[in-house]
Amino acid sequence: MPKITIDGREIEAPANAMLLPVALENGVHVPHYCWHAKLSVDGSCRMCQVEIEGSPKLVIACNTPVREGMVVRTQTPAVQNARRGVMELLLVNHPLDCPICDKAGECLLQDYSYAFGSRQTRTKEPRRKLQKRKEIGPRMILDQERCILCRRCVRFCREITHTNELGVFNMGDRSMLDVMEGQPLANDYSINTADICPVGALESKDFHHKLRVWFLKKTPSVCPSCSNGCNITVHHYRDRIWRMMPRRNDAVNESWMCDHGRLNYQQVGDETRLRQPQLRRTAKLQTVAWDEALGYVARTLRDTVRTHGAESVGVIASPHLTNEELFRLGQVVSLLGTKNVDTALVVGQGDNLLIKPEKAANARGARDMGLRPTAGGLNVAAMLEAAAAGKLRVLYILGSDVWKVADPQALCGALEKVGCLIVQDVFDSPLTERAQVVLPSLTWAEKTGTFTNVKGRVQQIHRAVAPRDEQPSDGEIFSRLLNQLGEGQWHFEATAVLEEIASAVPAYAGISFARVGAQGFALPESAGDAA
Amino acid sequence: MATQTVAVRRPLAMRAGFIRSAFAILKGLWITNRHFWRNLWGFIIRKPTVFTVQFPEERLVQPNAFRGMPVLVQMDNGKERCVACGLCEWACPTDCITIYPAETADEIERYPRVFDIDMSRCMFCGLCEEACPEEAIVMSQNVEICAYSRRGTLWHKDDLLVPVDKLLDTRLFHVRRGYDR
Ligand code: SF4
Ligand code: SF4
Ligand code: SF4
Ligand code: SF4
Ligand code: FES
């Protein structure tokens, strides 16, 4: 472990480390553009120059390995002069686009210009004209004039996605960034290049000209779209989500997330969402009050269990619910005494970077919370068969994934025969059309709780936007059902329910929100996945 | 603790003060009445002796640099100059500006799809004008924002647009001089 001195402070650095990350980790801010923690060193921007005792010239911190006894200075006049020079060169051809640039407010060129640049422009020559607003892919736009040629995006496409769409063309002061001929930036991770671009050259079409970034409020969360559970930050304002960005977690998603997950937030603010419970008294569904709908559900479930036995009730759970909600649902199921419980899960394509085949955030959590058939219980297909044969009288379906996974004919046949279909979902679907009772669900962005990813890492999500009309979460719905079905006062408060889980589910022993923290909590290896 | 009665004797000076304030009220009434009758008489004989503007038939001519309500500069092609950068929205101390940007095919890529100012909250401070990098929002001479409902005091983009040549000699001139642009 070499000992080095930065600005008079002794620091112990890991061997073979480069100077820049060591400085940053120890709170010494050395400005930099081209260096990125998850990409190789490029050394092209020269912004990170520092003074090292014994070296005749300034050196770039991102490409200088630490050495025992190294004495580094980051604030000397020579360093400041160099930074001012780099800034001036970068701005020679940079357009005055800040008022219309999506990056304004989180742009490193702006920030460093304030901190290290000079206030005057000395050049009188016209600025270089290049292509603006160039569509370089289905989800990305390039403004070549704004590019500062740091090559972060080029390295991303070379080293992370191995797709090589981007490159720097021409030489010297004619260099410019572009996509390769006939090779649009269309990979599944393309919007990450907009995140790592230090300026507003690469922009996501989805967020283009939508909102100034300084209005956005940020809530840490977890992507709901597959079982990888990428850590994200939800950017919201006026109770609406405007974009999602990856949050670094080296054990899960490094600094990245896939485009599909990133753009999969529209459903939260969709106007066609279900908001009120509905009941089918006559041929048509009618909006009713919560108490009435839940009272009806509880009565139906209780009466069916009493007259036809618990095995005439089936529950199909949703892997989009949080662990806490699923745990409560499990309590409903055991109170009813039925063994017919399973989870409908959409399985699709995965890749070897982040995307996993299981297309739900909490598939593993649903298994861990016991929402799968136990000895003598029926799985999804068997439940549908039983329903078609008239043996299953009440079917309680959460989410609409079953519509995507089950054999359509079997499903339609079963739904026709079943006496009472209860559907709890975010949107109208062919299921709600056939339902006796429809209960609206909340989306992940309106809930607080935990998801368990495919590797058994428990991670937190937080309420980013408030639900409309104080709509209850799924967990509250289950708690109210428990109140109606049996004795006792049930409440739903995620922290308290996680404590219950900690004592009831062996694999989750000792878990709490504090232990889960911002980066998640890995379940012990021995708690193998039940799949 | 037992209750106790305390007889307070007001000092003489205080009682005299009471009489003095009664006198002050009378004096105030006298002044108001005198003005009222004198104005009324002047109005009847059409020779007003005091400075009273007969609003709304008469209006003051405001000085050129007057800071009334903020308006949006309209370019010669009829469009707003604003590019929806959001700086005025951020600068406004009363949070009365609401902007939703959108993209256009024009050279300046973006424009405000929605630009609302809640005039009932605006205090004519002019910070929006100072923040604007495009000279797109300036203070005007207008101060009349009364409406029959709260909704009526919410001015939309079309209400706020004022052609640029109407502003060139007035506030825009002072903006350019004052902010050294
Ligand atoms: S587009 Fe952005 S990330 Fe790519 S080289 Fe230019 S400045 Fe760097
Ligand atoms: S890989 Fe999965 S978890 Fe990660 S961003 Fe994409 S959908 Fe979300
Ligand atoms: S004048 Fe002041 S209060 Fe009125 S809109 Fe501008 S910044 Fe806001
Ligand atoms: S500061 Fe000027 S250009 Fe920016 S949004 Fe306000 S009026 Fe428009
Ligand atoms: S960060 Fe070191 S040269 Fe760019």
Image (cartoon, coloured by chain):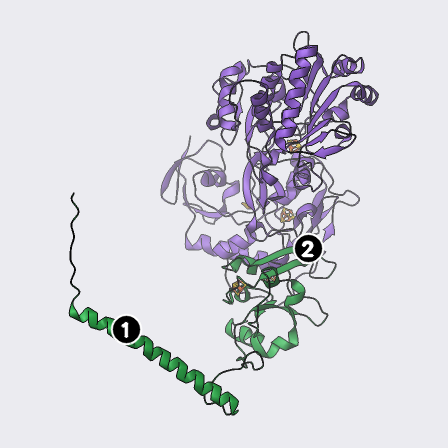
Chain colours: A purple, B green
**Ligand 2 image position (quadrant):** top right
Disc 2 to disc 1: CB gap under 8 Å: no
Most distant residue in the top direction? A376
Point out residue A246 in the picture as x, y percentages from the top left corner: 60, 37
Q: In the drawing, does residue A161 fall left or right of residue A461?
A: right
Which residue lies at the image location 58% right of the left edge and 38% below the top edge?
A470
Determine if residue A455 is in view: no
Residue B32 left/right relative to A496: left
B162 vs B120, nearest the viewer: B120
Q: Is residue A119 above or below residue A431?
A: below
Q: Position of residue A53 (x, y in %)?
A: 41, 45
According to the picture, the residue beneath numbered tag 2 turns out to be: B102
N-terminal of the pair, mark 2 or mark 1, is 1
Residue A72 in the image: state x and y as whole percent: 42, 44
The disc numbered 1 marks a residue on which chain?
B
Q: How far from the left and from the top, in percent, is residue B115?
A: 63, 60
Residue A183 against residue B45 in the figure, above or below: above
Inspect the image, locate mark 1, and give the three-letter code of the amino acid beneath it.
Ser
Q: CA distance from mark 2 to mark 1?
A: 64 Å
Secondary structure at numbered mark 1: helix
Disc 2 secondary structure class? strand
* Any part of residue A354 in sight: yes
* Quadrant in which the C terminus of chain A is drawn: top right
Q: Quadrant of residue A343?
A: top right
Chain holding disc 2: B
- In this rendered view, identify the residue nearer to me: A328 or A117: A328
- Report which residue position mark 1 lands on: B21
